[in-house]
Every structure is written in C-alpha cells, then in structure tokens.
Amino acid sequence: MTTFIFVFLLTVHVLHANGLQVPSSKSNKFQVRASPCSTHDAAPGDKQNKFEDEEPKFDKRRDFLKAITASSLLTFSTMNIGVENALASQTAGEAVRRTAANIPGYGQPDCYFPPSFIGKWRATRIVVASDDPYISQLPLPATITYDVRFITVDGDTKSDGSQKIVADRQFNEASFYNAIGAELGGKEGVRTPPPPALQTITWSPFNPNVCTSNYSDGSSKEIKVTKRAGELDAASGIISSSEYRRITTVSTGSFGGIPSISASRVLTKWKSEGVGKEQIVEGIEIVYTDGSLGGDPMAAGIGSSSSKPQMTSKSRLKLEKIED
C-alpha cells in the first residue's frame, strides 16, 4: 500500500510540474494553465496565437502519458526489488523447498532446530505407552537407545551457523527401527518375532514430507506429512512441532499388496540446556491416531472421522551429543 501511495503522489507531482491538473469528477478534460515559458502576449482574435494556445494541450497530454509510464515502471521495479531482497537470504535448496511447498502434495518446509543441534546424538527413548505391534511386546516402560542425526537443509553434516538445521529423518527412522529389532532379539519371552530387516529407506531434505521404507519380507511403509507447524524459541531453547501424517502400509500375506491407510498426529516438544559438549536436550513425543483414512485426528467432528483422537504412543527422550 505504501508503494502505491508513493507512486500516486509522484504522478501528481509530475502532472503539476508539467502544467496539468488531476481531472475532477465533473469533467473528463485536463485544464491547461498558462505556460511559464511564454515571452509575448497573445492578441485577441489572433488565429496564430489561438493555435499556439491549443498546441500545448497535445504536449501536456503526452507528458501525462510519460508520467504514467514512468510511475508504472517504478511500481514494478519496487516490487521486484522487494522479491529479490526476500529471496537473497535463502540458499538454493531452501528456495526449491519453499517453491515446492506451494505444490499440492509437497506440504510445508521442515521443522527447524538451533545451529547447535548439527551432528550426531545418542538418543535415549523411554516408551511409556505404545500400540506398535513390536514395541508393545516389550515390558513398558521400555528404554530404547539409538543414534539420531541433524543436518543442514542442504543435506550437509557440518554447518558454519548460518544454515537452517533439520532432523535427518532417513537416518533417524532407520536407527530407531533397527534398535527395536535389537531389543526384541535380546529379550526372553517375546511372543512376536523381530521385525523384518530394513532393506531401503528413502527421504530427502529437499522433499522432507515423504519417507518410504521397504522391508525384507516385501512389505513397505510410506509416511507422508500433509500438515506441519513448528516453533523455534532460541531464547528459551524450546522447540515445538505438530505434524499430521498419512501412513500407507503394504503388507504381505493373504491380503498382500492391498494398502492400509491410517492417519496420525505427532506432537513433539524439546528443551535444550547447556552449550558445547555439556549440551543436553530433553523432549516428549505424543502420537494421536484415528486409524481411518481422512479427517484430522486432532479436529474432532471434521472430516470423515467423528471419533475423538486416541493417544497411541507416548515417549520421553533425552539427547546427548556424540563427539565427531
């Protein structure tokens, strides 16, 4: 709005400088004032002088068009400068992510963490409640230890402090899954066999909303984030996030090949204290699900699911920095 007001005032200034007035609502004609450049008096009834009085109208209208053209160019120039300044602080990868975020199915950019999170951490997860078919076989609360990693938005494991930091979901998902298998393999009295070996897992920081896992028994699982909200408070060291996910699972067996689709929301909150090697991060993670396709489990009565959200998992986490 400020830009357009400035352009309007500039146009009015140019009009007055060239001897024109802004047309009123009562007349569509521009009023011509006496030219300050006149050096002689026009005699009444002099046709030559009358022609000279009429000639400036054409010049004034031409000057008016020039003023409008100049103001229009200034408007577009000002708008372009604003866009360039807004994009100047983004890396190439960040620009791709923000552009892709406007494409249906790509969702929002990833959740960001403080620069101190870059690198590898030892995670201790205490699972208080879970409906996971494998974790639920462990005596709860169950303690699972595994490694997690944080990288830059461009996929680097090192940072100079200027890049945005995200969780390496590919590394973290594989590490947690393998740790569950190790826990089940070392426990006596577990009725369920260990989960199938993880063959491949696909994820990219340039499209952080889709993570696909393929297993040795031919089954697969795709986690797709369709809604995301995050908040990073650097002053207090608190990082909060909320992600709504669509989970598509293709299992083997008598109904092999038929996908099963469910929806869940993951709420996570982290608190970071200390610096350097003494930095400790503690967090909590809660998962809600409705177990049906469509509908946000945190928005009861909206969508295809009318049931209230059900808490299916709750964990406390602690991260300790691992020296590189």
Image: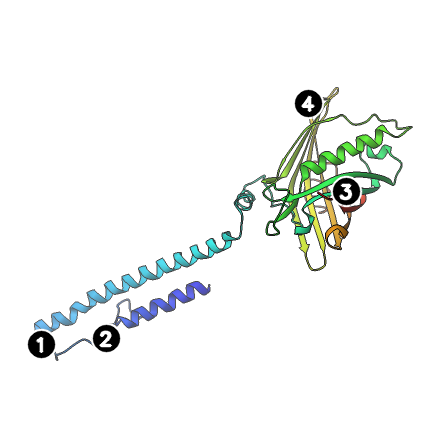
Q: Is residue 294 visible?
A: no
Residue type at mark 3? Arg
Residue 234: percent from the left, percent from the top? 68, 57
- The secondary structure type at the circle numbered 4 is loop
- The residue mark sitting in front, 1 or 4, is 4
Residue of label 4: 257
**Sequence-wise first label, 3 or 2:** 2
- Residues at discs 1 and 4 in contact (Cβ within 8 Å): no
**Sequence-wise first label, 2 or 4:** 2
Residue 176: percent from the left, percent from the top? 76, 36
- The secondary structure type at the circle numbered 1 is loop
- The secondary structure type at the circle numbered 3 is strand
Residue of label 3: 122
**Sequence-wise first label, 1 or 2:** 2
Residue of label 2: 33
> Distance between the Cα atoms at labels 1 and 4?
98 Å
**Sequence-wise first label, 4 or 3:** 3
- The residue mark sitting in front, 1 or 3, is 3
Q: Is residue 138 left or right of residue 196?
A: right
